[in-house]
Amino acid sequence: MQSFPMPHDDPDHPHSLLPPEPALRVKALETILAAKGLIDPAALDAIVDTYENRIGPKNGAAVVAKAWSDPVFHAQLLEDATAAVSALGFYGRQGEHIVAVENTPGQHNMVVCTLCSCYPWPLLGIPPAWYKSDAYRARAVREPRKVLADFGVTLPEGTSVRVWDSTAEVRYLVIPMRPEGTEGFSDEQLSALISRDSMIGTALAAEPAS
Amino acid sequence: MSDCPEIGAPEPVFQEPWHAQVFALTVHLNESGAFQWTEWVTRFSATLARHGLERDLNGGDDYFMAWLETLERLLAEQDSAPAQETSEIRAKWEAAYLATPHGQPVKLT
């Protein structure tokens, strides 16, 4: 985690570089809450470290790869994803349920949060800016095929698109279709084909290199 | 598979240090029971909707500005960080930065 101050080398400005206005407001909140014993500053650093370094789409990719290779886990994931991913050590702290939705030749799934930015943090980390933008949140529901085209995804005519709207209580994880030619791949090899966007539904799993 | 495709080009999780700090502060307060996450989502989505009426939000700085505003209002309502006090402490931090020679740690006096 970066910390203030961020001194600069301009000799004409001998004082510390002033952080941006919102950063000062956050520092003010931290100061007040810490003085009242309502927060533990060390816990804040630990949370940032967790989200910057430990949690990310690799977790989700490990889940999807296991679902592709292990039929028992696959069934458990579709039945109760919260329990299935918790067993792998991934669980939410905000009390949400995770629901896995599986892509098939007949249906492609895509996830949005029209209200704000609900997202399966334990599996995918912090959402990218585009997921949080008004443009995506408004268009994903209205014109999902156009949004997919913007991401370079063109689906066959016969494939329908289902858009799932996340909430504070339910977060969705898309299980992309396993690419052809990956028989006999290890979970690690499979994971390398599974991008963050493929688990949001704005991409497909990558084809293996020939 | 030495030449497997490049997945997930690296991008910073948080674009600015203060984005990370306000996020962590909120998660920590939720975990310590200051508010339910459902309450947070309700309030935050209302702020986003209000800001979104004025312009299209890009999901970057404006997203965390809405986040910060939501947290400030919530803590002011709970009286754990009243608006007046927050404003005063913010001003003290600003003064401390301006009064501290660069390279030295900035502290409130």
Image (cartoon, rainbow, N blue to C red):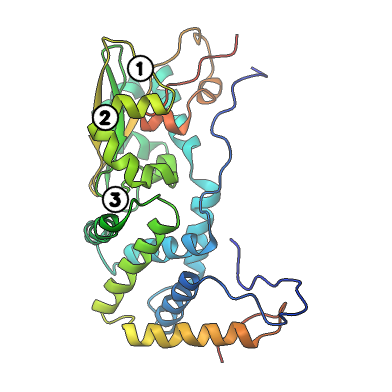
- The amino acid type, in three-letter code, at marker 3 is Cys
- Label 1 or label 3, whichever lies nearer to me, is 3
The tag earlier along the polypeptide, 2 or 1, is 1
Q: Quadrant of the N terminus of chain B?
A: top right
Q: CA distance from mark 2 to mark 3?
A: 18 Å
Query: Circle 3 — which element?
Result: loop
Note whether residue A153 is visible: yes
Cβ atoms at labels 2 and 1 below 8 Å apart: no
Q: Residue furthest front?
A: B54
Q: Which residue is mark 2?
A: A143
Q: CA distance from mark 1 to mark 3?
A: 34 Å
* The one of B32 and A150 positioned closer to us in this rendering: A150
Q: Which residue is mark 3?
A: A116
Which label sits on residue A71? 1
In the shown orientation, is residue B78 left or right of residue B4? left
Work out whether A133 lies above or below B33: above
Note whether residue A98 is visible: no
